[in-house]
Each structure stands twice: as structure tokens, then as C-alpha cells.
Amino acid sequence: MELIDTLQDVDARRLTRGTDMVFDGVVKRFPTGTVAVDGVDLAVRQGEFVAVVGPSGCGKSTLLRMAAGLEGPTEGTVTVGAKSVGFIFQEPTLLPWRDVRGNVELSAELGRGVSDDERRARAEESIAAVGLRDFADQLPSALSGGMRMRVSLARALTLSPDLMLLDEPFGALDEMTRLDMQVELQRLYVERGFTAMFITHSVSEAVYLADRVVVMTARPGRIAAVVDIDSPYPRSPELRYEKAFNDHVAEISALLHGGMR
Ligand SMILES: Nc1ncnc2c1ncn2[C@@H]1O[C@H](COP(=O)(O)OP(=O)(O)OP(=O)(O)O)[C@@H](O)[C@H]1O
């Protein structure tokens, strides 16, 4: 499971129209006794981009893993309406012996009912969508960190996910590449219209990408605040220099450090 960043057919229960994912009174207590999250209520609308920020160990990954169905809540419910879910990890988790095309085709190979021709066509389309057409025959070892993350994105996109779950996907990249990847992800989000839940330690990354930023407390993770980011998409990279943007960054940083709203 850990090697695969795309999960299909998540146990989809009927949801209120327009809502893609609901966490209702979610508590997660591990057998070790650690309470990772405690009483999380959050509804994510279809097509919404939600970023989650919070101190290390506050249960962000646990929330995402529950959304993916990789963990179950101890109390409460997690309901996901999306039929097809893409999961992107911090590490691109590519198979080193497969070239870019082979890695991107992997998720469709594991999917049910996809013909060879369709699999290849979808892989080519996703490779082009992330700007890697000229590198389709290269092995991961010949790619930069940013390019490897693009492969990981392309692999998730081949199944046209309704929901993308992204766990700190750009955390291992250098600053310049990270900023480029934010622009790239936003472009794909605008083009494809998926719902996104995106975990990050970077407040400015959250503000640049998200409709709403969920700020969590230290463990056990609870929602301290949800901040709306009003700027329309597509957002230009220059937005990062504007006052409203930096006011949001300051507000969320203060919330993270226990300041009042
Ligand atoms: N399988 C597990 N068994 C026991 N404890 C776990 C397990 N998975 C996570 N935890 C604990 O739950 C807490 C939340 O972990 P999680 O990885 O969700 O936090 P996080 O906010 O994503 O952290 P980070 O920002 O450092 O990645 C941590 O204290 C962690 O040690």
C-alpha cells in the first residue's frame, strides 16, 4: 500500500450534494495510548482546496490516512464521497527500475478494468500535463527532486481523481522548486477541478494554494481555527508579495503559536 499513491473506490457513502468529505467528531487513539486527533469536525466541499497546518505530531497525517481509508477513527466518522482518490506522499515513492512512463502507468495497471491502450493513453496525457514529455523514457535516478514529484503527481492524475490527498508533498524540495511546484499544482487543480486536502508545514504555501486553511492545535490535534482565503483562482505567484496575503500568513502564524484571532 505504501508504494501506491493512488487508491480507488474508497468506501463511498452517499453524501449531501456538494460535500466531498466529512470528519464528524473524529477521535484517533492508537493502541500505544497516543491520542493523535481529538474531536475533529470538518466538512470539505466538492472542488474545494483545504490546507491543514499544525505543529509536528498533531495528527495531520493521521487525518489524511483516515480520509484515504488507511486508518479507521476510534470515535466518530470519516465519510468520503469521491469515487477515485489520489494520494501523494512526501517522498515520490517511484520504482527505481521503471522509467517515468512505467511509473506513471503503475496506478492504472493496479486499477480494475483499464485496457492496455487506455492505460498508455492516460499515462501519456498525465506525463504531458506535468511537463515531462521529454523525460518519459528516463529512470527516476536521472531526474531532479522536483521532476520526481511531478512523476508522482502524474501517476495520481492518471485515474482522474475526484479527491487528492497530499501529505507535505513539497517538503523535501528546495525553495525555488517548491514555489514552482505550488504554481504547477494550482494549475492542475484549476484545470482538473478535483477536491484537495493538502498538509504542509509552510504557512505561505497553505495561503497560496488553499480556499481554507485549517489550523490545528498541538497533540491531541483539534481544530483551532479555519481561515478563509478569498483570492480567486488562478492565483499569480506575485500574490505572495501582496499585503492581504502576508496578513493571512501573519494571522495563521499567530494562531499556530497560540495567539488569538
Ligand atoms: N501507527 C501509529 N501508532 C502509534 N502512534 C502513531 C501511529 N501513527 C502516528 N502516531 C502518533 O500519532 C501522533 C500524530 O502523528 P501524525 O503523523 O499524524 O502527525 P503529523 O501532524 O502529521 O506530524 P508531522 O507534522 O511531524 O508529520 C504522533 O504522536 C505519532 O507518534
Image: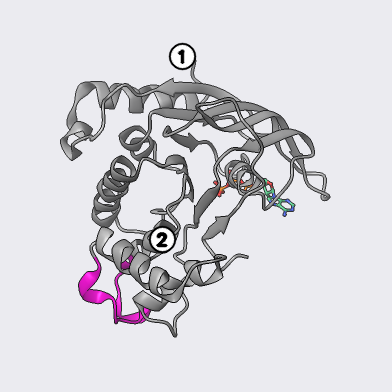
The answer to which of 117 and 162 lies nearer the viewer is: 117
Magenta-tinted stretch: 132-147
Give the image location of residue 119, x and y in percent. Answer: 42, 70
- Depth-wise, is mark 1 or mark 2 nearer the camera? 2
Measure how far apart labels 1 and 2 are at the Cα level.
41 Å
Q: Secondary structure at mark 2?
A: loop
Q: Is residue 174 above or below residue 119?
A: above
Regarding residue 146, the answer to whether it shows in the image is: no
Task: Give the residue displayed 64% in from the left and 45% down from the top.
Answer: 62
Q: Is residue 139 above or below residue 107?
A: below
The answer to which of 36 and 16 lies nearer the viewer is: 16
Quarter containing the N terminus: bottom right
Task: Indicate which disc, 1 or 2, sits on the residue closer to the N terminus.
Answer: 2
- The extreme top residue here reads 261
Mark 2 highlights which residue? 158
Residue 135 lies within the magenta run: yes
Quadrant in which residue 102 is drawn: bottom left
Q: Is residue 189 left or right of residue 161?
A: left
Give the image location of residue 104, x and y in percent. Answer: 40, 70
Task: Give the residue displayed 27% in from the left and 50% down from the top.
Answer: 184
Q: Are marks 1 and 2 in contact (CB under 8 Å)?
A: no
Q: Is residue 222 left or right of residue 55?
A: right
Give the image location of residue 38, x and y in percent. Answer: 71, 31
Mark 1 highlights which residue? 261
Q: Is residue 61 above or below residue 144?
A: above
Q: Which mark is residue 51?
A: none
Give the image location of residue 145, x and y in percent. Answer: 33, 67
Q: Amino acid at mark 1?
A: Arg
The answer to which of 102 and 94 lies nearer the viewer is: 102
Q: Is mark 2 within 8 Å of ligand 1?
A: no
Task: Give the residue displayed 19% in from the left and 39% down from the top.
Answer: 237
